Amino acid sequence: MIKFGTGGWRAVIGDEFTKENIQILSRALCDKMREEKVEKEGIVLGYDRRFLSKEAMQWAAQVFAAEGIKAYLINKSAPTPLVMFYVMKHEFHYGMMITASHNPAIYNGIKVFTFGGRDADEVQTADMERYINEVTDIPVDEMNYAEGIEKGLIEEIYPLNEYLDSIIDTVDMNKVKQRGLRVALDPMYGVSETSLKTILMTARCEVETIHERHDTLFGGKLPAPTAETLRTLQNYVIDRRCDLGIATDGDADRIGVIDDKGNFLHPNDILVLLYYYLVKYKGWHGPAVRNICTTHLLDRVAESFGEKCYEVPVGFKHISAKMFATDAIIGGESSGGMAVRGHIKGKDGIYASTLLVEMIAVTGMKLSEIMETIRKEFGGMALVEKDYRFSQQKKDEIRKRVLEDKELPQIPYEIDNVSYLDGLKIYLKDGGWISVRFSGTEPLLRIFCEMKEKQDAAAFCEVFEKYLDI
């Protein structure tokens, strides 16, 4: 029952996300570590603010302790990037984060990180599933939590300062201090508030926060920073005349931004903004990486600087692997996750937010002005995203037609090429594209379409809606 998707293992609480399954997964990882002879170094565990996250971390630690593997527990709810940073900085081979990221509140899950602080790739997760299937002595052995602490097999740590200092040391804090920026922060009831407030207030920013309390239902909304979920932040930025608004998802590895005029900046825009800034203003050199559902405007910007933009399947493990292979400056996805060279090997909404603030300070421009400059120079693209839910029978029918039989509807545009790298993607001669794929984290079919005009992108999506009867 434990299967890893593009963002780790996620399941409905009380259905598949149970103490038994959490401990089975933990026991499997113990067996894997022991076979790889890395069990003596221990493992790092963290948790976010979701229901049962802290308890799930402790249940996992009790299994590691029973197997004689020391568990280092971050003893306060923490951002996912903090766990990745600690695994990387202290050269652990494995780390675990209890989170379901931006999924609905009824979900929880586990992300596994490997050496270097990277997301476990497909080879690693397939290997873990094999170990999971080999766990037969259920319920697995566990050690009492207090006994684990007493025996030194469970140790509570809180390395937040080390992580924050690593970010502060990489940005021009003096420039930010000179601007006296006003920033509105929306952690979406998640775990970014302490980190972002500490960094921004150190840079003498005026920080005002909404939705900071602990709420396992996330205010009744999806804990994902989208145009729909950030309307309150938009109004706050306008009413309080802030320079920008920053939001992060439930575990703070994704970002959403409201500019100084109250406009929602799509994650595609943020990715392009940061790449443009790092190359033009900071003088960095190197390619960019994006997944198949992310804007091709990034390709244009890279090409203008004599660089290349690489395309990979959905799943940040593919982005981080390609970044490592090509020494890319930045990698990102249209859902708001992005990584920058020189920091951790995965997405970090806190670091991305800090770089955006630095960008405003260094350029001396407002966020809306920088975005307008880019659009004038490189043109604009409009992205339409649609999600569809249906029965398993309908899902099997769509999968067969689209991915096995490779049927296509009548396309009203000139096709350049068709790819099945990850689902279906059709590239058009005029630079537009459409992607049709099943989500790796939720039971959804997702269609992304990018064209010069939004109405054309919406119309292209409707072509597939009618063809697939969804």
Image (tube, grey):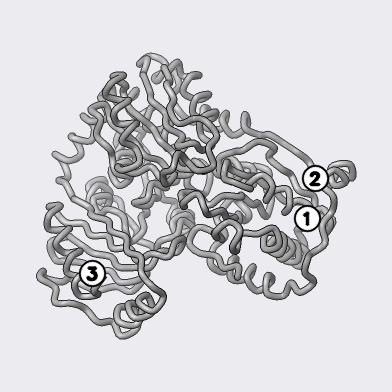
Task: Kindly state the secondary structure of the residue where label 3 is placed.
Answer: strand
User: Counting residues from the N terminus, which is met first, the one under dot 1 or under dot 3?
Assistant: 1
Identify the image quadrant of the C terminus: bottom left
177 above or below 459? Answer: above
Q: Which residue is mark 2?
A: 154
Task: Kindly state the secondary structure of the residue where label 2 is placed.
Answer: strand
- Residue at the spot x=78%, y=64% of the render? 34
Q: What amino acid does circle 2 point to? A: Ile
Q: Nearer the viewer, mark 3 or mark 2?
A: 2
Residue 124, percent from left and from top: 60, 66
Residue 469, percent from left and from top: 23, 74
Few, some or many residues within 10 Å of mark 2 (<14, 14–19, 20+): many
Task: Kindly state the secondary structure of the residue where label 1 is placed.
Answer: helix
State if disc 2 and disc 3 touch (CB < 8 Å): no
Q: Which residue is mark 3?
A: 426
- Residue at the spot x=47%, y=47% of the render? 347
Relative to 324, 20 lies left or right: right
Depth order, front residue of 45/142: 142
- Residue at the spot x=60%, y=54% of the render? 113
| Distance from the alpha carbon under mark 1 to that under mark 2 | 9 Å
User: Could one spot residue 272 in this view of the protein?
Assistant: no
State if disc 2 and disc 1 touch (CB < 8 Å): yes
State if disc 3 and disc 1 touch (CB < 8 Å): no
Q: What amino acid does circle 1 point to? A: Phe
- The quadrant in which residue 130 appears is bottom right
Q: What amino acid does circle 3 point to? A: Ile
